[in-house]
Image (cartoon, rainbow, N blue to C red):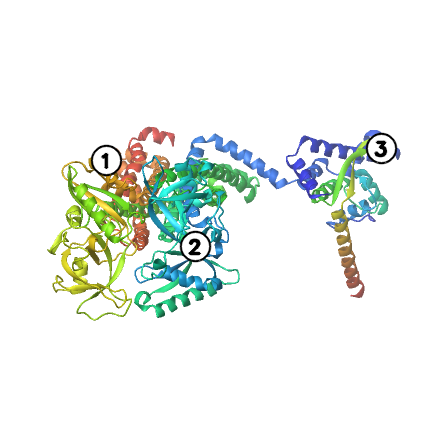
Amino acid sequence: MADKSELFPGTLDMLILRVLSRGELHGWGITNKLEQLSKSALQVDEGSLYPSLYRMEDKGWIEADWRMTENNRRAKYYRLTRAGRKQLEAEQAQWDRMSAIIALVLHSA
Amino acid sequence: MSFLRLIAHRLRHLFRSPQSEAEMAEEMSYHLEQRAADYAADGLPADEAHFAAHRKFGNLASIQEQAREGRGWRWLENFRHDLQLGVRSLRKSPGFTLLAVITLALGIGANTSMFSVLNGVMLKPLPYANLPQLDRLYRATAQNSEGNISPADFREFQQIKDSYGDAAAYTPERVSLAEPGRPAEMAASARATANLFSLLGVQPQLGRDFRPGEDTPGRDRVVLLSQRTWQTRFAGSPEVIGRSVRIDGEPHVIIGVLPPSFNDWRFLGGVDFFRPLAFTPAQTSDRANPIIRLIARRAATVSPSDADRLVTTFGTRLAQEFPAVHAETHWRRVILQTVAAGPGAAQILPLLIGLSGFVLLIACSNLANLLLARTMTRAREFAVRAAVGASRVQLLRPLIAESLLLALGGGVLAILVAYWFRDWAAVRSTGENGEHVDFVVDWAVMTWAFAASLTTALAFGLAPALFALRLDLNQTLKSGGRGTTGGRGHQRFREILIVGQFALAMVLLAGAGLYIRGLDALNKRRAGWESRQLVTGMIALPTGTYVDVDKIASFHRLIEERLAALPGVESVSLSSFTPAFVWSEVRKFVVEGQDRPVAGREPAAVVNRVSPRYFDTYGTRVLSGRSFHERDTANSTRVYLINQAAARGLFGDQNPIGRRLAQADGDNLRWGEIVGVVTDVQPVVTDANPVAFQIYLPMAQEPKREFQLTVRAAAVAPAALVDGIRAAMTELDADLPVSRLQPADTTIYHASYQDRVLRDMLAYFGVLGLALASLGIYGVIARTVAQRTGEFAIRLALGASGRDIIRLVLRSGVRLALLGAGAGLLGATGVTRVLMAAYPSLPTDSALILTGTTLLLIAVALLACWLPARRAGKIDAIAALHAE
């Protein structure tokens, strides 16, 4: 497990928004996508996804509907709202800026 | 997600609905199943795959709790929970709850009622468009800062009115109103320039407004009714438009009805109907008689300071151009809204709010005491909860919820109190013309009630709670489980509250007592005159029938002769004023043989024109010289009677009789001779600008169209004369109404109705404050007695008598009351000052009131402490010690 990384606090929301920006997904789908995109390198309790989802639904960044999956199970599909898209852009820009600064400091010091 | 959808989403999850719980469970179990299926596909046996999925997911219960925290208004949900707990715990102690809510309701109700008065009198805007631009303009003299202006001055002002904006004028009058088949009635009318209503932005609800040009003689026989007159006299019939009524004997056509909003009592609300203000050429050039009231509307381009400058400059110009009438006068501008409340309101209303605030403070400290006691009994519960890790906020939250519930209950009841007060005030403040003060319970008032109850309940509810949190946990837990012990600190806190309550009660009672006694003394005093056997009434002779002074004078003589011949009548007098009320006619005089002061600074006196029998009728003593007699007529030498104050002020030690006076209007002085000196008279109402000098002149030498009729009954009760007088008057002139024809004492009683409303409110405040304070001291002493039962038992066991114990308890109560009364003396002195300033002519006897109030407070404190003290004296020492 040495090659798995814990998430910086607050970044889970951004990752979820990013995943949802490509289309709507249910919670399980988001988990899979995250795993897939991070090449299973993230160390998170899968369940902690849900409080994050509910919080963002509450803030109006994402919205959800209950629909049938391809194998005919009821599932809650989340998708990005316009506010969510804006939030994602803002967070991403912030992240890029921060990581550039951190990289700059680390590499030049 | 749209905003609405977001709100809907939150509301759905707000109360942890079963549906949202089920959805959360379903969503998570789907996840777990899928993960388990994945693991199973990797070759794990079913049950192991299940556990692995759970491991990977994390602690399900804790994640669900986190999810709940994240969604909806969690704090609101917690709050709801606290409220539920609060309701439960309040219901468990109904006695406490009832007492607390009633205490709050009374305190806040009193305060809210006073706020509704302030709101109705000062805050609520008058119902006119462009209100901020509307001003009253006054011509101020040394005696009267709100003086009226003369028709000639008004015409002068109209020449500059365009640079100001617009101006309208009105003048109140009393007229007779008659319709075929009904007796004539006296009505309060006003004449107004044709533009008055359009200037105020008021449209008639029925018919039409005055037309431009109708305010000229000959075209002015049109009438606009007030809504009230329309309802009471014309039964609200729409057919009144175009109907003809006789006003002062002349036919007039009703052209319109004003809207109900125009009944606002603060401004022109008492007027029954309006006629156009039309002046004959002679009147228009009259500069000596200030009869006109001026309203101006500033144009949008004219700033308030511009307006002030314009008005002041105009006044200065008048004073320079016409020094004979305008010397030492100036013009001033006052915003209409501030004038409307009337003089004194600005002083009295804050006083009332302040005093009701005192009632509220007393109520609040009672509440604080109650809550403190309640918190103390729960101290152990708090200590235990704190010991197992509850945070301060968690401890406070249920207390806050309880306070909020109490505030809500108190606020709702307070609004009921305010409604009740409104009805009471409407009845009590109804004037003779049916107009009454309407203190609407509107949003402002409701907001005030809830803001006040919220603030007080939170402030006075949380103070004891915070106090409780400073508890030493160990100490509380160790003290054998008795939560009631409240240490010395709490005892001190409660005692301070009691002292504060008594101080406030002292201020309240002293203030109320001073005002009430002053008012009673004022209303009962008959200084220099008497009223017991008198009937008074008011008559206004219409200009149509009584065209000149000769007509008026001969009718005066006719009235005197006819009424004097009635059985049971001792004497009859006509006068411009009665001594019961303020004489509003002020004139300036010069004394022959003395240096004439600068124009405008001559000595001023109030003037009463009286018929010969006036002094007999009122019992005003002629101290030297003679009274007026029938030979003092328009053709004889002008004569004056002056009062003692004028005699002393104008002539010092010299004999004034035979000296000559003239009125100081212009260079043409008409001299008259002083023929007698009479005693000073004082009215039964407060007088904002009392004038000491009183000068009488014979009615026959300056016959007055509007006058007071006074009849003295010989041996019968004055009420028995009323019908005979009315019949005799109708015989003389069927169109001539006599208004308020009734015993003088009845008129005097009615006249002070507004003062009496204030008086009653203050009395209620005083009683309420005292009742609450005694409740407070009772509670504290009773609690002290309960706490000290053990100590008393030991004292009894050691040989103290029950009487000793009673004395001990009483002493501790009276000590608090005395401390409070002492502190309250300071505040009471302040209240006395304010009252004296607002009512300069109010007779007061502060030493008596202050002593009386102190004694009353001590007596009440003794009484309130007596019950618990007696209980303490009856303690069964053995039983009490066993219980320890």
Residue B37 image label: 3
Please tell me if label 3 and label 2 are on a single chain: yes
For the residues labelled 1 and 3, the Cα–Cα distance comes to: 109 Å
Residue B454 visible: no
Q: Mark 1 points at which residue?
A: B723
Give how far across and how far down residue B159 sits, in percent.
44, 64
| In the image: residue B231, left or right of residue B859 | right
Instruction: Check if mark 3's residue and mark 2's residue have beta carbons within 8 Å.
Output: no
List x then y, in percent, for residue B77.
61, 38
Residue at 47% x, 64% y: name it: B305
Sequence-first disc among 1 and 2: 2
Residue identified by numbered label 2:
B336
Whether residue B547 appears in this view of the structure is yes
Q: Residues within 10 Å of mark 3 (few under 14, many from 20)?
A: some
Mark 2 crowdedness (10 Å alpha carbons): few <14, some 14-19, many ≥20: many
Mark in front: 3 vs 2: 2
Q: Earlier in the sequence, mark 3 or mark 2?
A: 3
- Residue B119 on image: x %, y %: 44, 47
